[in-house]
Image (cartoon, rainbow, N blue to C red):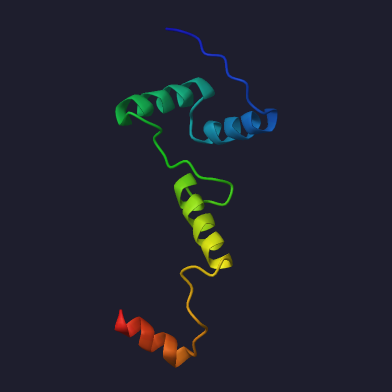
Amino acid sequence: MTTIQVRVNEKTKASATRVLHKLGMDMSGAVNAFLQQIVLRKGIPFRLLTENGFTVEEEEEINRIADEAARGINVTKAMSGEEALAYLRSL
């Protein structure tokens, strides 16, 4: 066995400890389970999301598209509801 020291925000640790207690686990057991999943999956065992709830790639794509739209690239003229439906049906 070996020891790992980790610096964690006090509130985060307290909140996580409460959740783990309800699950019948302690912090050491949870960290061991997490590390075992990293080994089994050969990577982080969950999607890493930005504060906006997207992956980094998704957020970059949204920002790229928004930037293009602001510059008038890949945009269409305003359409009525009927025109929009006809356009969608034509795709």
Measured along the vertical axis of the image, is residue 83 above or below residue 91? below
x and y percentages locating residue 16 in the rendered image: 58, 33
- Viewed as shown, does residue 68 lie left or right of 7? left
Instruction: Determine the image quadrant of residue 66.
Output: bottom right
Query: Among all residues in the image, which is located at the extreme right?
Result: 10
What residue lies at 36% left-to-right and 29% top-to-bottom?
Answer: 37
Quarter of the N terminus within the rendering? top left
Tell me if 3 is positioned left or right of 39 in this view: right
Query: Residue 71 or 46: which is nearer the viewer?
Result: 71
Q: Which residue is more in the foreground, 49 or 24?
A: 49
User: Which residue sits at x=54%, y=31%?
Assistant: 21
- Rendered location of residue 64, percent (x, y): 51, 56
Residue 33 appears in which quarter of the rendering?
A: top left
Please give the name of the residue rendered at 32% of the width and 31% of the height, measured from the top-left corner: 41
- Does residue 19 sit above or below 63 in this rendering? above
| Residue that sits furthest to the top in the current view | 1
Q: Front-most of 53 and 60? A: 60
**Could you tell me residue 28's position as x and y percent?**
50, 20
